[in-house]
Image (cartoon, helix red, strand yellow):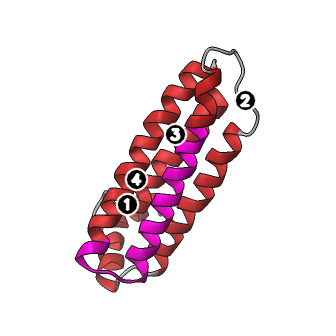
Amino acid sequence: MTITSAPRTATVGALLAVAAGLIAPNNLIAFYLTALAAALLLFAAFLAYLDAAERLDARSGLAVATAGLGAALVMADAAIRFPAVLDPSAPQGASALAVVALLVVMTGVVGELVWMRADDAASLRERLRPVRHLLHR
């Protein structure tokens, strides 16, 4: 199990897109953060594609589908924001696409956990052993 997987990278990108709509003070900054999130989601889709090209199974196919669809939704969010980039408020429906993208990529994370291999789960347990030890104190 690697630290950087496509569903986890896509989740970070989708969270950035949602945060851009919620905490950005104006539409220009929200557009910039949404464009960064789209780039991150495209990177995640590329990672998922490389994994699927190496060995195609249900897990890698779901990762490609969720990262690709999430990237498309966030790019649509950026496309909606672009014409009103200098307006003080965001156009209607822009943030809703980012939330839908987050739900889509979270499906990929759930799929990654469902199809986790036994050796991946063992290494995850080994990495979390110090945390469990600290929590039992």
Q: Is residue 135 above or below residue 97?
A: below
**Image quarter of residue 5:** bottom left
Residues in magenta, as a range = 52-78
Q: CA distance from mark 2 to mark 3?
A: 18 Å
Q: Residues within 10 Å of mark 4 (few under 14, many from 20)?
A: many
Q: Residue at x 60, y 40 (%)?
A: 77
Q: Which residue is mark 2?
A: 91
Tag shown at residue 16 = 3
Residue type at numbered disc 3: Leu
Q: Secondary structure at mark 4?
A: helix
Q: Position of residue 36 (x, y in %)?
A: 43, 35
Q: CA distance from mark 4 to mark 3?
A: 11 Å
Q: Which residue is mark 1?
A: 6
Magenta-span inclusion, residue 6: no
Assign the magenta stretch its main secondary structure.
Answer: helix
Q: Residue at x 30, y 59 (%)?
A: 3
Tag shown at residue 9 = 4
Magenta-span inclusion, residue 53: yes
